[in-house]
Amino acid sequence: MNTESTATFETIESAQEYLGLLAEALSESQGAIEEDIRVQKASSSPRRLDALKLVSYNLQKLKCHMMRSQRILNDLRTLRRLLHRGKPLIAA
């Protein structure tokens, strides 16, 4: 197994950074696809327009999954901090 690939996500913060970069790339791709959809509407290729709309829909779904993953990582980071402080998670 490649040592570099296993060391990429040794911390929650490194995973958060990666997800942030991936979210940026998704936003850029979504913008490009939306522009293609606007251009394609003037064309007479409904099949290509449908394909572009499907790509846009799937990018949006992926973006939602990314946002959920980022929230989960935030929760894990918060829980890790609480556990390392030694404070009880639930107040009595």
Image (cartoon, rainbow, N blue to C red):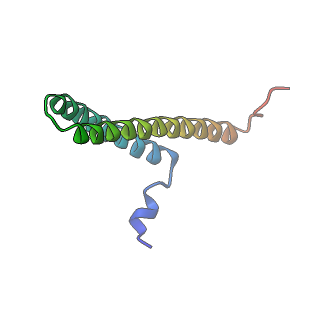
49 and 87: which is toward the camera = 49
Q: Position of residue 56 (x, y in %)?
A: 33, 36
27 and 47: which is toward the camera = 47
Seen from this angle, which residue lies furthest bottom?
1
The image quadrant that residue 75 belongs to is top right
Q: Position of residue 82 (x, y in %)?
A: 67, 36
Q: Is residue 77 left or right of residue 55?
A: right
Q: Position of residue 60 (x, y in %)?
A: 39, 35
Q: Is residue 58 left or right of residue 48?
A: right
Q: Residue at x 34, y 42 (%)?
A: 21
Q: Specify the quadrant that holds the C terminus.
A: top right
Q: Residue at x 13, y 33 (%)?
A: 43
7 and 37: which is toward the camera = 37
Q: Residue at x 14, y 28 (%)?
A: 42
Q: Specify the quadrant that holds the N terminus.
A: bottom left
Q: Is residue 85 left or right of residue 65?
A: right
The image quadrant that residue 24 belongs to is top left
Q: Position of residue 48 (x, y in %)?
A: 23, 42
- Is 63 situated above or below 6? above
